[in-house]
Image (spheres, rainbow, N blue to C red):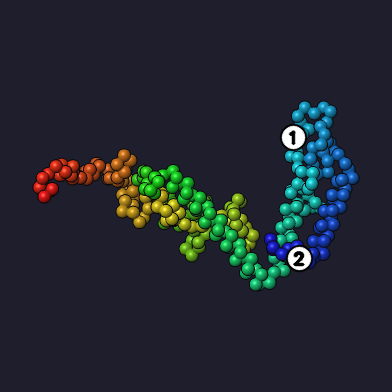
Amino acid sequence: MNANFEDDEITPAQRARFAAAEQKIKESRKRGTVNGRDWTGALVEHQRNCRGTCCVRQVAVTKTAFNFNDDVNGFTWGGIAQMDEDTVRAAETPQQTAARLARDKAADEAQQAAIEKLSEDKKKGKWADKLGEMLFRVPRPCKYQTLFLARTCAGCNAKVPQGQTHCQAPRADGCCCNAQGQRICGEKLAGCWSHEKSQTCIYIHTDEPQWADACSGALCYDRQRRVFFKKGEGLPPVPQTRNFAGLAGDKRRQK
């Protein structure tokens, strides 16, 4: 909604809706308490024969305002708010629209960055030691890397055509709307945040040498030694280390 909405001139249509809402409130107040509820719908007294039935059919709301979905002259409060926002946006200049879209984009990017950071921090605490080294790995391809390569949305599994950066598949619970006002998925087509940002994903990715073996199912991992190996080949030999403890008593080293 426009940040300067309060300073905008109220249109005749808005004034009529506000007057109808005010009249609805006045009429409700005059009726007083009906079936134990006041004008807001809040339960103020139980019926004499109440056995826990008169007070559970309707959710009580605060005494200071109508429920957001209450009908007012054929409109819901949510519908009225949306119409008001549409009216304000219709009156925007091209410059105001561009500024609003830029603010919305910046807010969306900041929210996305915060989500990614939270995911990274959780995985670091769970799968990495204090030095950032991975405690263990899973010898299978990363789900998100695989979906990204197939241009498949991680949110709804719909295909994302070339040239699109976000899923445009229709969804009843989508987070965005297209130009026609239809609800769409809106999920960003991306790879694995954890691997790209901090290398803390336990699965295998395309930039790792084990990718091909992970995809074929030939890759194995030993958690105790923290090493990869292929099926049928066994664990790699333990690296031989030289022991220099005996050199301390060697007189030739003391000359």
Residue 150 percent location from the top left of the image: 43, 56
Residue in the foreground of this view, choosing between 13 and 29: 29
Secondary element under disc 2, as helix, strand or loop, is helix
Q: Which residue is mark 2?
A: 7
Q: What residue is drawn where x is 82% and y is 53%?
A: 21
Label 1 amino acid?
Val
Q: Residue furthest front?
A: 255
Q: CA distance from mark 1 to mark 2?
A: 42 Å
Horizontal side, residue 252 vs residue 157: left or right: left
Residue in the foreground of this view, choosing between 7 and 61: 7
Label 2 amino acid?
Asp
Q: What residue is drawn where x is 69% and y is 61%?
A: 1
Residue 134 percent location from the top left of the image: 37, 46
Q: Tell me, yes or no, whether the two marked residues, 1 and 2, touch with CB atoms within 8 Å.
A: no
Q: Quadrant of residue 47?
A: top right
- Number of on-image labels: 2
Q: Residues within 10 Å of mark 2 (few under 14, many from 20)?
A: few
Q: Which residue is mark 1?
A: 56
Against 145, residue 5 (above or below) is below
Please name which of the two marks, 1 or 2, marks the residue nearer to the observer. 2
Residue 94 percent location from the top left of the image: 65, 72
Q: Quadrant of residue 176?
A: bottom right
Residue 102 percent location from the top left of the image: 60, 66
Q: What residue is drawn where x is 76% and y is 43%?
A: 62
